[in-house]
Amino acid sequence: MDTFVSQTRKRNIDGTTDEQREPVLKKCKEEECNQGIVKEDVKEDAYLTEFSQSWQKIEAEGLDCDYALLFPKEEADCLYTQLEEEVVYLTGDKTKIQVFGKVYNVPRKQASCGDAGLTYTYSGVSLQASPWTPTLEYIRDAVTKATGQTFNFVLINRYKDGHDHMGEHRDDERELDPLCPIASVSLGAVRDFVFRHRESRGKQRRRQINPVKLELAHGSLLLINSPTNTHWYHSLPARKRVLTPRINLTFRRILQHGKK
DNA sequence: GCCATTGCAGCTAG
DNA sequence: ACTAGCTGCAATGG
């Protein structure tokens, strides 16, 4: 439950230093962006041991997220490799999307797993949840231990390189439990992630609210709490200098009697 | 009938 | 030359 999250956060976040927070926010320096690749083993271990214990709160008007490193690098490497073997991505018609009357290929690969019988509708395409795989169950349970939240569905997005991306959107509230946070686990390449307030978008923007930009690290967990999803859109913009894949898992709770 | 949608073309700025 | 960031699109479904 929420209580668990708050307790975990209180115990750890108080001791978090600015240096620990620095790498997550986009205002980080270049060298810190590259840390996962270049750092010495000893330093990295110390860093991860410290950081994996701590939550970082990310807040803005109507936005409430928690960020932490859930898996140390070696475990995250292992999970990434296993997912590459286990996950079967959609093919055929399910890789197409229709926007404003035109049909496009989805600029990433998608799959979904969940409890038996669940479906998730994404932009007119109904996704049948496949059964959980061992690795996905393991990650799901790790997320539950870290957050106290339970999930019955995971959407898997694989971005093969920096050309793959996801446009600005909110997660469909109709079939989601609005009070259950969405838990986003990142494995593989570090990618930028952007939140934009709904009233600061488009031609007739009512207000000027700065976007919130994050970097999602290998092995990280981003909890998107209510009511973030009603006020803020999010996207994974293209980053053409990124050459390696990223797998993103978004764990959700879907209401059994979702509307159609 | 109203409103939100989602990816890309086309553009600008650096 | 190239990338990032921003705007318009005017169809369709709920």
Image (cartoon, coloured by chain):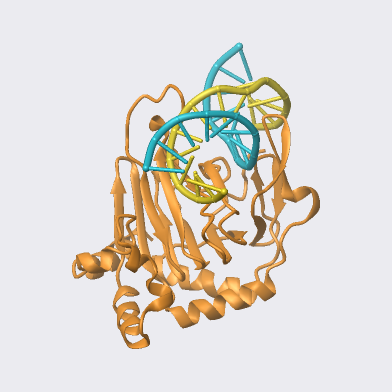
Chain colours: A orange, B cyan, C yellow
Compared with residue A69, is residue A198 higher up or lower down, i.e. above or below?
Answer: above
Q: Can residue A7 be seen at all in this image of the molecule?
A: no
Task: Identify the residue shown where x is 58% and y is 65%.
Answer: A245
Compared with residue A51, is residue A128 higher up or lower down, i.e. above or below?
Answer: above
Task: Identify the residue shown where x is 44% and y is 62%.
Answer: A149
Compared with residue B5, is residue A204 higher up or lower down, i.e. above or below?
Answer: above
Position in image of residue A112 (x %, y %): 65, 59
| Camera-side residue of A116 and A50 | A50
Say how many tags the image has: 0
Position in image of residue A150 (x %, y %): 49, 63
| Camera-side residue of A197 and A108 | A108
Horizontal side of residue A92 vs A20, given as left or right: right
Please state, as top left, top right, bottom left or bottom right, where the C terminus of chain A lies in the image.
Answer: top right
Q: Can residue A256 be seen at all in this image of the molecule?
A: yes
Q: Quadrant of residue A80?
A: bottom right
Position in image of residue A237 (x %, y %): 50, 49
Horizontal side of residue A83 vs A76, given as left or right: right
Task: Identify the residue shown where x is 23% and y is 68%.
Answer: A19
- Taking the view exactly as shown, the residue that stands out farthest to the right is A92
Q: Quadrant of residue A128?
A: bottom right
Compared with residue A161, is residue A35 higher up or lower down, i.e. above or below?
Answer: below
Position in image of residue A199 (x %, y %): 39, 30
| Camera-side residue of A211 and A226 | A211
| Camera-side residue of A13 and A32 | A32
Task: Identify the residue shown where x is 34% and y is 49%.
Answer: A64
Horizontal side of residue A31 vs A84, given as left or right: left
- Taking the view exactly as shown, the residue that stands out farthest to the bottom is A42
Please state, as top left, top right, bottom left or bottom right, where the N terminus of chain A lies in the image.
Answer: bottom left
Horizontal side of residue A48 vs A135, given as left or right: left
